[in-house]
Image (tube, rainbow, N blue to C red):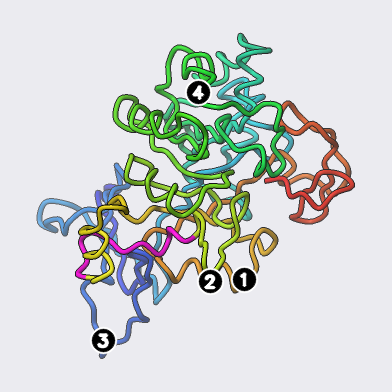
Amino acid sequence: MPASNFIKFVNARVYRDGYTSPPFTESTSDPQSTIYVDDDTGLIVDRPSSVVYDIKTVDLQNRILAPAFLELQTNGCVGVHFTQYASDEEYVENLGKPTPSRTTALYEESPLSEWKSAFHLRAKSACQVLPLLKPRSFEGGATLLGAHCEGPFLNPSKKGAHNASLMQKPSESSIDEIYGPTTSPIKLITLAPELPRSPNLLPYLTQSQNIRVSLGHSAATYETGLSALAAGASCLTHVFNAMEPLHHRSPGLAGLIALPSSHSNNPERKDQHESTTNPVAEPPYFSLIPDGIHLHPATLTLAFRSSPHKCILITDSVELAGLPDGLYPGNAQIAHPQRKVGNRVTIEGTDTLIG
């Protein structure tokens, strides 16, 4: 019997736009609970003609059908940091192989603020690493989406576990000096919008270089963040972590997740359009670390419910993920020994979280 050209999933609870469809019953038949997938490309397609193609049917019996996990921020795992990434073989063997506890299908790697150190102190090594993070697929491994550079344009006052000495101001460095002659592997950059010349850098990155910009490791006010979104930024990095806390009179960057869409009829949005003091900005995507360590479950729920369609869950994993508990040396980005206890990694002797 020839292989099926299409797979028909029936009786599925389909995850769409941040919501899961209700359980399927005979009395609540829903055509959206049926999904067709091209067996050759893996793409969801419209209903094919059964006269022309073979169709294999799979009854999911009310199981959830959702996309595979897309990781937009990981620094490494199982002993390998992405700034030390040396070959495709190493990636597939150690970083891109899914396991029962790590079912990622696509990665966007986060080389962190170590890029400044790399290009100034080990230029040859860094120029070798960044091209390796260009988008591509691997046989037997998660697809690479490109590089997420978390820095070096970060605010030292919100450094988290980053080495503040590696951070730069946009007014003092050029993109070529920091990232090298080509930015094509870079798909996302996290920066602090309050730094000098950040407002000028935003349209250059988003319009000229086609790089998405996320706001993070920042002491920016709500108003500064609003201006950055209007200038081209479209995301917030690990909300609540490494930014000003959400205060009832001064919400900071975290308050931006509640922005109404310009496509809504919300009077608040109408007021913003008519205002001459507040720039018009679309609500940002925002990432959260749902490990029960970086955020209290109530805080996580509050953020998610504010805008499910814009919420992105990340691991922000480091090279110690998947390794036994213990004390480990630092790396080019972490200048101190690292203590791993369960899923929690801190700078030794402190409560500063790493990843």
Other-residue count near label 2 (Cα within 10 Å), few / some / many at <14 / 14–19 / ≥20: few
Residue identifier under label 4: 171
Residue tagged 1: 297
- For the residue pair 127 and 233, the one nearer the viewer reads as 233
Does the residue at mark 1 contact the one at mark 2 (Cβ under 8 Å)? yes
The disc, 1 or 4, on the residue closer to the chain's N-terminal end is 4
Residue at image mark 3: 28
Q: Are marks 3 and 2 in contact (CB under 8 Å)?
A: no
Look at discs 3 and 1 and give the one toward the viewer: 1
Do tag 1 and tag 4 residues touch (Cβ < 8 Å)?
no
Secondary structure beneath dot 1 equals: helix
Of tags 3 and 4, the one toward the viewer is: 4
| Disc 4 secondary structure class | loop
The stretch in magenta equals 255-265
Whichever of labels 3 and 1 marks the residue nearer the N terminus, that label is 3
Q: Residue at x 74, y 55 (%)?
A: 343
Q: Which mark is residue 301?
A: 2
Residue that sits furthest to the bottom in the current view: 27
Q: Nearer the viewer, mark 2 or mark 4?
A: 4
Q: Amino acid at mark 2?
A: Thr
Mark 3, secondary structure of its residue: helix
Which quadrant of the figure has residue 12? Answer: bottom left
Marks 2/4: CA distance?
Answer: 38 Å
Which class describes the residues within 10 Å of circle 3: few (<14), some (14-19), or many (20+)? few
What is the secondary structure assignment of the residue under circle 2?
Answer: helix
The three-letter amino acid code for the residue at tag 4 is: Ser
Residues under numbered marks 3 and 4 in contact, where contact means CB atoms less than 8 Å apart: no
Which numbered disc, 3 or 4, marks the residue that appears first in the sequence? Answer: 3
Residue 339 is covered by the magenta coloring: no
Q: Is residue 263 magenta?
A: yes
